[in-house]
Amino acid sequence: MGQLANSLKDFIKSEDLLLPTDKVLVAVSGGVDSMVLAHLLHESGCNLGMAHVNFQLRGESADLDEQLLKETAEKWQVPFHSKKFDTNSYAREKSISTQMAARDLRYRWFAELKENHSYQKIAVGHHLNDVLETLLLNLTKGTGIGGLHGILPKRDSIVRPLLFAKKEQIIDYAKEEGLNWREDQSNDSDHYQRNLIRNQVVPVLKKINPRLEESAQNSVEIFRSVEKQYAKSIEQLRERILRVDGGHVMMKKSDLKAIEAPILTDLIQEFGFNYDQCKSLLGAAFNHTGKIFQSPSHTLNIDREHIIITPHVQEVEQIEIHNSQGVLTIGTRQWKLTEHLNNNYSIKSEAWVGAFDLVKLAFPLTVRKWLPGDRFYPLGMRKSKKLSDFFIDSKVPVNLKEQIHVLVSKREIVWVIGHRIDDRFKVTEKTVKVLEIEVNAGFWFVNVPVVT
């Protein structure tokens, strides 16, 4: 067993990439990297199949790639899967680059093969030079700490057993073993960013550090360790300062005093806000109450004491409820209506569960947005109150008021949904039947949790 084969065996073991019983699908392009990976795994006795995608981007050359791989698979007596895609059409349809389109098509098909042919792992031929190029490319683009860990040896079922090996080692092995492979002429073109890094930038940097690949590998290992600890710290901070309640997220403005823009970005990036917005938010948080920031999916509002993030709402103007039992969907929330006898019913003290005297309700009930001038009798009060005043007293943020809906019976408000029922429709000792309405999590109703 040669040096590269021994190193492969050690790397697979140290990174826990493959089990002896795994059936492995090897992604092969016809280039030297994937041919060497397939050969090494085949020689090790691995139960493998080969998968090749013809992206129909290189004309006759692509057909010759496929022919070489088909002949190799027949020689090694391993299963061979191949498929052609109209990559340019897919890229136009999705409005993405050709490279992104090829990647999407490739990995989607690999996942199908894995499922349909009972493969446990998908092995791809990335190597140490790819790690270096990815690191440099991410540094150039400014991807932050998440882009510094390079290419991971394993992600879900995708493994990269050659990630330890330099390109020159791979080529030497191919020559020693007499392997045939195909050269992709597009790799020589500096039109693609990665090629520009490989062909122009790396040679200059290697004049400074001839062991550039090894240095990059050491760096990404450090970055991975730092990133893991950083991710844990971010999650702990998120749990401590973010309050999530169905349709919105809140944090105290005072918690922002000790947070810098990169940290805030990682805290709320799942809501679509970028670094520049987070930097502006920190500058505005304490002297621009009412200022609003928009992401593609959410609205962020600077309130008096809190930062409030809400999803873009799905408008529901008016819906009628005709039955006192059943399950229905209103907006993005599911409603469950159930009748109960009062003698064995216990009222739930939850904001999204309402209990009402069924006899006092007139169907159909109506769900609609609250309107200026709306009044109701808040539970425990004998006098009516304007909803606008109720919201002020309850300290409901201005931008959340727009999303609040009410349940109505014969023009009388029965429930300010998620906030308070009307006293006139409450369950009493005289109630015979109870209508319980339970509303689950969704986006267009909002209640404000008590934040302490």
Image (cartoon, rainbow, N blue to C red):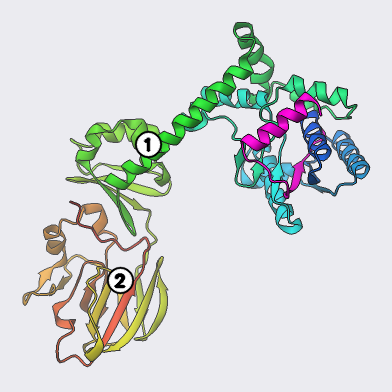
- Name the residue carrying label 1: 265
One can see residue 246 in this view: yes
Badge 2 element: strand
Give the percent coordinates (x, y) of residue 87. 73, 43
Q: 437 or 391, which is in the foreground?
A: 437
* Labels 2 and 1 touching (C-beta < 8 A): no
- Outermost residue to the top: 207
Q: In the picture provided, is 142 more to the left or to the right than 58?
A: left
Tell whether position 69 is magenta.
Answer: no
Q: Is residue 300 above or below residue 144?
A: below
Looking at the rendering, the stretch of residues picked out in magenta corresponds to 1-30
Q: Which residue is mark 2?
A: 368
- Within the image, what quadrant is residue 129 found in? top right
The quadrant of the rendering that contains the N terminus is: top right
How far across and down, in percent of the image, does residue 83 sit? Answer: 80, 48
Pick the residue in front: 276 or 337.
337
> For residue 205, which quarter of the picture?
top right
Query: Could you say whether the residue bearing mark 1 is in a helix, strand or loop?
Result: helix
In the image, residue 131 sits, relative to residue 93, either above or below, namely above
Label 2 sits on what residue type? Arg
Residue at image position (84%, 26%) is 174
Q: CA distance from mark 2 to mark 1?
A: 36 Å
Percent across and percent down for residue 165 are 70, 25
Inspect this view and state whether residue 188 appears: no
Give residue 155's position: percent from left, percent from top.
Answer: 59, 42
